[in-house]
Amino acid sequence: MTFLSSFTTTSKLALGIGASLVTLTACGGDDNDDSKNWETSGANWPPVPTVVAHRGASALRPEHTLEAYRQAIEDGADIIEPDLVITRDGVLIARHENAIAILNADGTVREATTDVVDRPEFASRKTTKTIDGTAITGWFTEDFTLAEIKTLRARERIPAIRPGNVRYDNQFAIPTFQEVIDLARTESQKRNRTIGVYPETKHPTYFQSIGKPLEAPLVAVLNANKLTTRDAPVFVQSFEVANLQQLRTMTNVRLAQLISDGGRPYDFIAKGTAETRSYADLVTPAGLQAIKSYANGIGPYKTLVIPVVNGALGSPTALVANAKAAGLPMHIWTLRPENSFLPASFKKAPVADATVRGDSAGEITAYLRAGVDGIFTDDPAVGRQAVDAFLKK
């Protein structure tokens, strides 16, 4: 079975480079000879359906660590995904949030992706900031230099759901974006297959507001690595719109608009009454045409493709057909293996146990049947199994 889709740009870039058509042809995870020229190996890439390792193999290792990305590659991921935030000295690093430890009102830890709460030398860095309209007390990457970040160690973000990952706490360093790129390049050459990177810009409006915009440092890293064309094995994604529009004028790599199942892009909120659109407006035919003017694809939340009705997957919406009509392939997020994240019909006994692995492959297969071009998954081994089985039918 072969799937054809294209991540194309219909508008000319401010760089003066005309649009070109990039066709993505399925290869089911097979090796290809282009990986030796990794920086321009994306002409027939990625395989479709695509397996994107969401924060690495985050169901198996603490997320956003080189070890999680390495495990994802071993398990068959086509792409590894780093969320990007920035340090005080302007270096992009891979973390789910710029808040690397978050406290509850009583001082207990709500969420931590590093051991910073146990580091007395950084106790004075604890502060409260408003991020995208929400007050958060904790520690933030923009208050640390890269050298300081490198002294910290990663921790499992959701230990109650992934207790097996806790055994890796305090073992792994926090990687830079450059280190993630280096890993993808090295593993591509080692395995003779192209492994891409799918960075997400986190809270771009916030970072611009504090004088640490992400766009220029991101493009600088891409350029330094000769990742400058639509043949590069790169997608840049964001839940905001304005920063993707800005990036469209700065780079020719593929861009993807992330779409939530509710609410509004924060840059729209920040504009006040000047911008009243919501994510729901972005998935209308008119909204998809607007996205096509600056992005090459979309990343909708999974239930925008197939809603959950009474604990089971319902009938597919028109989004896949509308996106294909607009020439916008989609990679949906996020397919996770534990009961905590699965519709009731895919949970396994005991269903009340959030840590038990359910039928994630079954859920993935349902979305593949609906026509999505790729999936973000926390367990790429399950995603690879589901995609390979689907392609054999």
Image (spheres, rainbow, N blue to C red):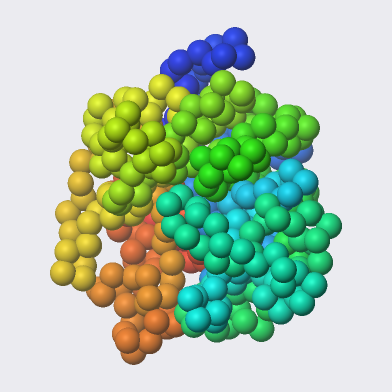
Q: Residue furthest right?
A: 147
* Residue depicted at x 74% and y 57%: 144
Image quadrant in which the N terminus is located? top left
Image quadrant in which the C terminus is located? bottom left
* Residue depicted at x 59% and y 10%: 16
Q: Residue 89 location, x and y as percent?
A: 77, 46
* Residue depicted at x 34% and y 66%: 362
Residue 127 drawn above or below residue 84? below
Q: Please tell me in which quadrant of the rendered image residue 40 appears.
A: top right
Residue 374 drawn above or below residue 270? below
Q: Is residue 183 visible?
A: no
Residue 10 drawn above or below residue 261? above
Residue 73 drawn above or below residue 37? below
> Is residue 188 left or right of 202 when viewed as pictured?
right
Q: Nearer the viewer, residue 178 or 362?
A: 178
> Is residue 172 left or right of 129 when viewed as pictured?
right
Q: Is residue 334 visible?
A: yes
Q: Residue 79 location, x and y as percent?
A: 58, 49
> Is residue 377 left or right of 217 when viewed as pictured?
left
Q: Residue 195 location, x and y as percent?
A: 64, 47
Tell me how many marks there are: 0
* Residue depicted at x 61% and y 25%: 251
Q: Residue furthest bottom?
A: 350
